[in-house]
Amino acid sequence: MTLTRKLMTTVASCAVVGTMMIAATGAQAQEAAFKTKQAGDIVIRGRVVGVVPDEDITSGTLAGEGKVDDDVIPEVDFSYFITDNIALELIAGTSKHDVTWNTGSSNLDLGSVRLLPPTLTAQYHFMADQRFSPYIGAGINYTFFYDSKPGQFNSVKYDDGFGYAFQAGFDYAISGPWSLNVDVKKIYLNTDVSVNGGATKADADLDPWLFGVGVGYRF
């Protein structure tokens, strides 16, 4: 199943479950007490996230371009509300990607690599006292590359590095401290790739999109 189909299935499933929950409780669900966003709150969310690289990988010594496949992962994030509207969010999740090089006449196997991209964003939450509360955010990222498999080559190395991130999303309060969450992030990430000890080098802009859906609990 392609990532697009996986994401569509995930989003559709969440939408169906959410609709069934609201329909089952009717007006009572709409009137149920819920916890508004307030200064000092800590929110823990669990999401299913689609990681979709928007890559541009080129080399001065090898014709063609690199390709990185998508992944679907679990993710945990923690938010702290400085004020009712301003929060800091830290996300933690790791993804695995297969990498190939298309020379135009053939595909070379560059193996796979895992990414650990902790990302810290500052967010502004609109309508913090409402059941539906959208937000936007921006921040920084540091990506660790690990468990690299070289495929048909002797070695493939990726340099760790900083990037920056933007996000938009919303929380929908269900009842009490529980909420549904939809979140989209764009992470701008560049890494230098060395193949066979540096005999071949490439410049890689991975720039992944992160599409997430999940639930949150507010303390």
Image (cartoon, helix red, strand yellow):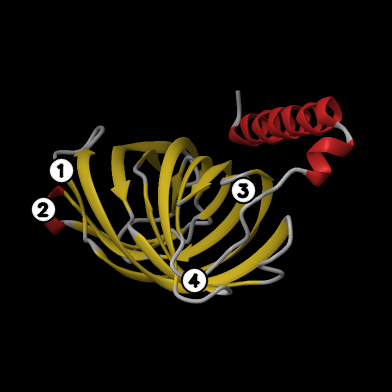
Where's residue 48, x and y in %? 52, 37
Depth check, mark 1 against mark 3: the one in front is: 3
Residue 39: which disc? Answer: 4
Where's residue 171, x and y in %? 65, 54
* Residue behind mark 1: 155
Q: Is residue 192 above or below residue 116?
A: below
Are the two marked residues, 1 and 3, in contact with CB atoms closer than 8 angstroms?
no
Secondary structure at badge 1 equals loop
Say whether disc 1 or disc 3 marks the residue closer to the N-terminus: 1
Disc 2 from disc 1: Cα separation: 7 Å
Q: Amino acid at mark 2?
A: Gly
In this rendering, position of residue 84 left or right of residue 151: right
Secondary structure at badge 2 equals helix
Q: Is residue 96 visible?
A: yes
Disc 3 from disc 2: Cα separation: 44 Å
Residue at 87 percent of width and 33 percent of height: 26
Q: Is residue 12 above or below residue 162?
A: above
Say whether disc 2 or disc 1 marks the residue closer to the N-terminus: 1
Residue 1: which disc? Answer: none
* Residue behind mark 3: 181
Are the two marked residues, 2 and 1, in contact with CB atoms closer than 8 angstroms?
yes
Are the two marked residues, 4 and 2, in contact with CB atoms closer than 8 angstroms?
no
